[in-house]
C-alpha cells in the first residue's frame, strides 16, 4: 500500500468509528444515570483485574516503578472512579438556583446535558492518569468517547487499548492508538467535545481543528511553573516539599516546579538544603523513585538545557539508559536557554531576587503558568501572590499537592490551557450545563408586556 492509500484507510476507519459512536449516542442508551454507573463500575473492575499488566507496561516503557505508578497514576484514577460512583446520582441531578422576583412564581435550575461524542487525547508523562481520568469524566456525563493515548509509551497505550476495546461496545467507548497521522485524522472529524492534554504547541493545532465546528474544547497544557521562596519562609520544610515535587517522574510533570526565585538573603541555605534533600532520596530507577526520560529526543533536549558553567549540583547523564541525574543550575537569567521553555526534566533553575516586585516581574515576563507556588509565612506576601500572579492552580507552602484534592478543579490559564476537571468538575467539563427557568400556568402579571408607565418600569427594575 502506498502512503496515500494508507492515509485514506486510516481516515475511513476513523470516520466509521466516529459515525458508530454518533449512532450509539442517538440510541439514548447513555442517558440514564444507572447506565453510566454500571459502565463506571465495569471500568473500575476491569482496571483492577488488569492492574499487574498496567504496572508491567509502564515499567517497560520508561522504568516507572509499581509504587510510583500507584501514587501518581492508579490511586488518583481509582479515587476519581470511586468518587464518580459514589456521587454521580447527586451530581447529575438538576442543580437548583434561586429565582428572581420578576419570574415568580417559578423555579430555576441547571441541567447537566451530555455533549454527545467526545475525543480525549492523552499525554505520555502520566499515561493512565491523563488518559483515563478524562474518560471517567466523559462517561459520567453520558457521552460516547474515543480515547487516543500518547503513542510514546507504546506498551501503556497498547494495554489501555486492549482493556477497553475487548470489553466495551466500540460505539460507546473505544481506543484509537497512533501518532500524528491518526490524531490528525481524528481531529478532522466533527466532535461534540475535544479534551486534549499536551504541549501548548499541539494545543494550538487542536484548537484550530475544533474551530470550524465550534467544538467545545478543553486544553490541559504546560508552562514554566515558578516557585517563590520568600525571605521569611521556613527553609527546611519549603525545600523538602519543593524537591519532592520537582523530581516526581524525573521532573516530567506538568505541575513540577520549573524555576525557583529565592530571596538573596537565604539563597545559600536554600541551595545547601536542596542538595541535602536530593542526596537523602538517592534518586535512581532501580530504587523506584526515578524514571527514565521518555525518549532520546527528550533526553537530548533536556541535556541541552544544562549549561556546565552554571551547574551547582549534578549535571551527569547517561544516554543509553535515558537517565539524567537531579541537577541544580544557578545564577540563571531570563535570557538563558533554560528559561525559554518548560524544562520537563530533572533540572531545577535557581534565580535570586531582592524585592518581591522584582520576583513578580520575572514571572510576569513569561507566559501564564499551569502552577504557581509560594513559600512564606507573611500574610501580605500571600495576598499579593494570589492577587498579582496568574496561574492555573497552585499552593502556598507546598507544591503539586493541590492536585491530590478532587474538590479543587485542575486546569490552566492562557498559554497553560483552558477548562478544568477532576471530581464534580469533570462532569461539568464534559456536559453542557443547561440553565432552565420553569414557570407555572396559573399566574401572569401584565408587568413584562409593552406599554409600560414610568412607575411600572421602576417596579421592573426593583423586581429584576
Ligand atoms: P504533545 O503535545 O507532544 O502530545 C500530546 C498528544 O498530541 C499525543 O497524544 C500526541 O500523539 C499528539 N500529537 C503530537 N503532535 C501532534 C500533531 N502535530 N498533531 C496532532 N496531534 C499531535 O505533548 P506530550 O509530549 O505528550 O506531553 C508533554 C506536554 O504536555 C508538556 O508541555 C506538559 O506540560 C504538557 N502536559 C500537560 C498536562 C496538564 O494536565 N495540563 C499534563 C501532562 C503534560
Image (cartoon, rainbow, N blue to C red):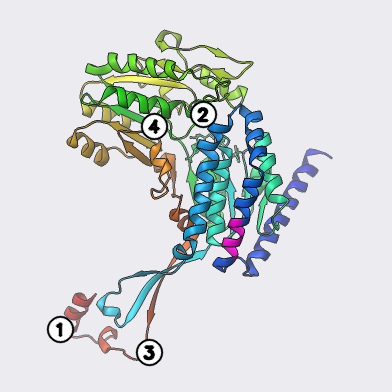
* Distance in Å between CA atoms under marks 4 and 3: 56 Å
Q: Position of residue 136 (x, y in %)?
A: 55, 53
* Distance in Å between CA atoms under marks 1 and 2: 68 Å
Against 25, residue 338 (above or below) is above
Instruction: Inspect the magenta stretch and tell me whether residue 221 lies in it.
Output: no
Q: Quadrant of the N terminus?
A: top right
Q: Residue furthest top?
A: 309
Comes first in the chain, label 3 or label 1: 3
Comes first in the chain, label 2 or label 4: 4
Q: Are marks 1 and 2 in contact (CB under 8 Å)?
A: no
Q: Residue furthest left?
A: 455
Mark toward the viewer: 3 or 1:
3
* Distance in Å between CA atoms under marks 3 and 1: 26 Å
To which residue does mark 1 refer?
455
Numbered marks: total: 4
Q: Main secondary structure of the magenta part?
A: helix
Mark toward the viewer: 2 or 4:
2
Q: Find out if the beta carbon at label 4 lies less than 8 Å from the nearest ligand 1 atom.
A: no
Please state if 133 lies on the left or on the right of 102 as rendered.
Answer: right
To which residue does mark 4 refer?
225
* Distance in Å between CA atoms under marks 2 and 4: 16 Å
Comes first in the chain, label 3 or label 2: 2
To which residue does mark 2 refer?
249
Q: Which mark is residue 441?
A: 3
Image quadrant assignment for residue 277 = top left
Mark toward the viewer: 1 or 4:
4
* Residue stretch rendered in magenta on the structure: 35-41
Kindly tell me whether residue 456 is visible in this rendering: yes
| Ligand 1 falls in quadrant | top right
Mark toward the viewer: 3 or 2:
2
Q: Position of residue 222 (x, y in %)?
A: 46, 36
Amino acid at each position: 500500500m502506498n502512503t496515500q492509500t494508507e492515509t485514506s484507510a486510516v481516515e475511513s476507519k476513523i470516520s466509521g468509528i466516529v459515525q458508530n459512536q454518533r449512532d450509539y449516542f442517538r440510541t439514548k442508551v447513555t442517558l440514564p444515570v444507572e447506565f453510566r454507573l454500571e459502565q463506571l463500575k465495569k471500568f473500575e473492575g476491569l482496571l483492577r483485574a488488569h492492574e499487574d499488566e498496567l504496572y508491567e507496561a509502564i515499567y517497560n516503557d520508561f522504568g516507572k516503578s509499581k509504587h510510583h505508578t500507584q501514587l501518581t497514576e492508579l490511586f488518583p484514577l481509582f479515587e476519581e472512579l470511586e468518587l464518580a460512583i459514589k456521587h454521580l446520582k447527586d451530581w447529575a441531578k438538576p442543580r437548583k438556583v434561586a429565582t428572581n422576583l420578576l419570574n415568580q412564581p417559578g423555579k430555576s435550575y441547571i441541567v447537566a446535558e451530555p455533549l454527545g461524542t467526545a475525543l480525549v487525547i492523552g499525554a505520555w508523562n502520566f499515561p493512565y492518569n491523563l488518559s483515563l481520568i478524562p474518560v471517567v469524566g466523559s462517561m459520567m456525563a453520558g457521552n460516547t468517547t474515543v480515547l487516543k493515548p500518547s503513542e510514546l509509551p507504546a506498551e501503556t497505550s497498547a494495554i489501555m487499548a486492549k482493556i477497553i476495546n475487548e470489553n466495551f461496545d466500540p460505539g460507546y467507548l473505544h481506543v484509537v492508538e497512533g501518532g500524528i497521522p491518526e490524531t490528525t485524522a481524528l481531529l478532522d472529524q466533527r466532535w461534540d467535545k475535544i479534551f486534549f492534554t499536551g504541549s501548548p504547541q499541539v494545543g494550538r493545532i487542536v484548537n484550530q481543528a475544533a474551530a470550524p465546528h465550534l467544538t467545545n474544547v478543553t486544553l490541559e497544557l504546560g508552562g514554566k511553573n515558578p516557585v517563590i521562596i520568600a525571605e521569611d519562609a521556613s527553609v527546611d520544610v519549603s525545600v523538602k516539599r519543593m524537591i519532592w515535587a520537582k523530581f516526581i517522574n524525573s521532573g516530567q510533570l506538568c505541575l513540577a516546579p520549573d524555576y525557583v526565585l529565592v530571596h538573596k538573603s537565604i539563597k545559600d541555605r536554600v541551595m545547601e538544603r536542596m542538595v541535602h534533600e536530593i542526596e537523602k532520596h538517592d534518586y535512581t530507577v532501580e530504587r523506584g523513585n526515578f524514571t527514565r526520560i521518555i525518549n532520546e529526543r527528550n533526553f537530548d533536549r533536556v541535556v541541552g538545557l544544562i549549561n556546565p558553567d552554571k551547574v551547582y549540583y549534578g549535571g551527569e547523564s547517561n544516554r543509553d539508559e535515558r537517565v539524567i541525574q537531579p541537577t541544580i543550575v544557578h545564577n540563571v537569567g531570563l535570557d538563558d536557554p533554560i528559561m525559554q521553555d518548560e524544562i520537563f526534566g530533572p533540572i531545577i533553575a535557581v534565580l535570586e531576587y531582592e524585592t518581591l516586585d522584582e520576583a513578580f516581574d520575572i514571572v510576569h515576563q513569561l507566559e501564564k503558568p499551569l502552577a504557581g507556588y509560594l513559600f512564606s509565612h507573611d500574610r501580605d506576601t500571600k495576598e499579593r501572590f494570589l492577587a498579582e500572579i496568574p496561574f492555573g492552580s497552585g499552593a502556598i507552602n507546598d507544591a503539586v499537592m493541590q492536585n491530590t484534592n478532587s474538590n479543587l478543579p485542575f486546569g490552566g490559564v492562557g498559554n497553560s490551557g483552558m477548562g478544568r476537571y477532576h471530581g464534580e468538575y469533570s462532569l461539568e467539563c464534559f456536559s453542557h450545563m443547561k440553565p432552565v427557568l420553569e414557570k407555572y400556568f396559573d399566574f401572569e402579571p401584565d408587568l413584562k408586556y409593552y406599554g409600560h408607565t414610568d412607575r411600572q418600569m421602576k417596579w421592573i427594575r426593583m423586581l429584576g
